Amino acid sequence: MKTYTITVNGTAYDVTVEEGSGQGAAPAAAPKAAAPKAVAAPKKSSGGAGSIKVEAGAAGKVVKINANVGQSVKKGDAVITIESMKMEIPMVAPSDGSVVSIDVAVGDPVEAGAVLATLN
């Protein structure tokens, strides 16, 4: 069993996923192709990480960078958008601040909890 925290529009939800045994009337569907393994992306910053982290609420793929380094954001503003389970989910600023680093690129796979950007 794996537990994930998924954030949707600033509200965090804890989700537990249980892997099926494949026994029974309907076996679990196997993925058609292996998903790429998420790895830490190189930092794309203007020097140093900020003290406020914008983290992935779910595993997925980065589909949009909503903010730029140096841009001021308010609490709840979308910083990065990821796609997870065919849904686009904005990862929002947890507080007001200025974007110090964007640590991913469009197309990067990310794991739940991965740091996507930092603010000060």
Image (cartoon, rainbow, N blue to C red):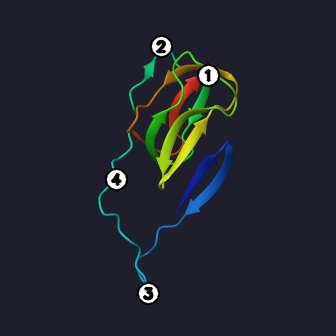
Estimate how packed mark 4 is, as few (under 14), some (14 to 19) or many (20 or more) residues with alpha carbons within 10 Å: few
Using the numbered discs, state the Cα–Cα distance from disc 4 to disc 2 in whole angstroms: 31 Å
Using the numbered discs, state the Cα–Cα distance from disc 1 to disc 4 in whole angstroms: 31 Å
Q: Residue furthest bottom?
A: 25
Q: Which mark is residue 51?
A: 1
The one nearer the camera, 60 or 106, is 106
Using the numbered discs, state the Cα–Cα distance from disc 1 to disc 2 in whole angstroms: 14 Å
* Label 1 vs 4, first from the N-terminus: 4
Q: Which mark is residue 46?
A: 2
Residues under numbered marks 4 and 3 in contact, where contact means CB atoms less than 8 Å apart: no
* Label 1 vs 2, first from the N-terminus: 2
Q: Which mark is residue 20?
A: none
Using the numbered discs, state the Cα–Cα distance from disc 1 to disc 3 in whole angstroms: 51 Å
User: Image quadrant of residue 25?
Assistant: bottom left
How far from the left and from the top, in percent, is residue 28? 41, 74
Q: Amino acid at mark 4?
A: Ala
* Label 2 vs 3, first from the N-terminus: 3
The quadrant of the rendering that contains the C terminus is top right
Using the numbered discs, state the Cα–Cα distance from disc 2 to disc 3 in whole angstroms: 55 Å
* Label 4 vs 3, first from the N-terminus: 3
Instruction: Find disc 3 in the rendering and name its residue.
Output: 25
Q: Which mark is residue 35?
A: 4
Query: Which residue is found at the position 69% from the left and 26% from the top?
Result: 74
Query: Which residue is found at the position 66% from the left and 52% from the top?
Result: 13
Estimate how packed mark 3 is, as few (under 14), some (14 to 19) or many (20 or more) residues with alpha carbons within 10 Å: few
Estimate how packed mark 1 is, as few (under 14), some (14 to 19) or many (20 or more) residues with alpha carbons within 10 Å: few
The label nearer to you, 1 versus 3, is 3
